[in-house]
Image (cartoon, rainbow, N blue to C red):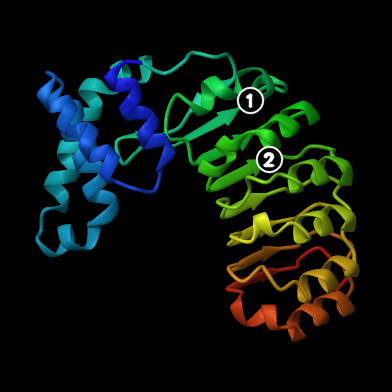
Amino acid sequence: MSESLAFLRAIIARPDDDTPRLVYADYLEENDQPQRAEFIRLQCQLARHLSQLVKDRKLESVLNRQQELLCQFESRWRAELPQIPGVHWSEFHRGFIRGVAIQYPDTFAEFASIILQAAPITELRFYQATQADIRVLAQTPALLQIRKLYVAVNIFGAGVARILASSPYGESVKILETNGWSMTDLGVLAFLQNENWQSLEEWHLAWNDLTDLTAETISVCSHMQTLRVLNLQYNNLSTRGIQVLKKSPILSQLRQLLWEGNSVS
């Protein structure tokens, strides 16, 4: 294993920690890549010390220098990433690509290990996904590095929801978007019964087939203590279901409870 690959694996293993990134920056500077090292340090500084940069009136110069480095080197740095049809790498954050969008079905099932070992990916978005994609995702320990997981409209239903919900690796996901899955109450129940999803801060469940039973089960769930946004728009909830949520302890912790598009009077 090359030294650069060893550094990358250490960064991927600790995606929230700046220390391995800054150690790698030192290595790059010592090995004739000063611009890459500077870029990593600049972006870590922007992510962690923005208010101090504003206070010290250094923000503009840091942003300008970041843009200069991107203009000069971004295409070269992106060329180091695997080129896979239908895989779109997102922006740089803290010196590395932080997200990936999967355009075509079955792509993730085939290339998951390559994608998740290429960069410290914490945001994963599927524009189209199959049951095979979700099954591979649920079974990969690399799901532990994902903080934001978006799976666009797919006619999955409760069966595929249960596959993802059963994953033992969902504990680090903070934002989960499962809109338009045709998910039933049983799919939601599967997530609620697995405490590995207890770090969720936002859960988007719009355009599914959920009823008041979902509201009732969420209202008594004891391990969704970090949930701050709950999106239940365009489901089959009644006024009674929304009132159950409003009267439950979970309401006090929510910043947003969205229910537009239900049969609520």
Q: Residue at x 74, y 83 (%)?
A: 248
Q: Going from the N terminus, do you reach mark 1 or mark 2 first?
A: 1
Q: Mark 2 packing: few (<14 Cα in 10 Å), some, or many (20+)?
A: many
Q: Amino acid at mark 1?
A: Gln
Q: Residue at x 16, y 40 (%)?
A: 64
Place residue 243 in its image quadrant: bottom right
Q: Position of residue 41 (x, y in %)?
A: 19, 40
Residue annotated with mark 2: 151
Q: Is residue 237 visible?
A: yes
Query: Against 76, is 248 above or below?
Result: below
Q: Position of residue 47 (x, y in %)?
A: 29, 51
Q: Position of residue 69 (x, y in %)?
A: 19, 29
Q: Quadrant of the C terminus?
A: bottom right
Q: Is residue 97 visible?
A: no
Q: Amino acid at mark 2?
A: Val
Taking the image as shown, residue 42 lies to the left or right of residue 191, namely left
Q: Position of residue 11 (x, y in %)?
A: 36, 36
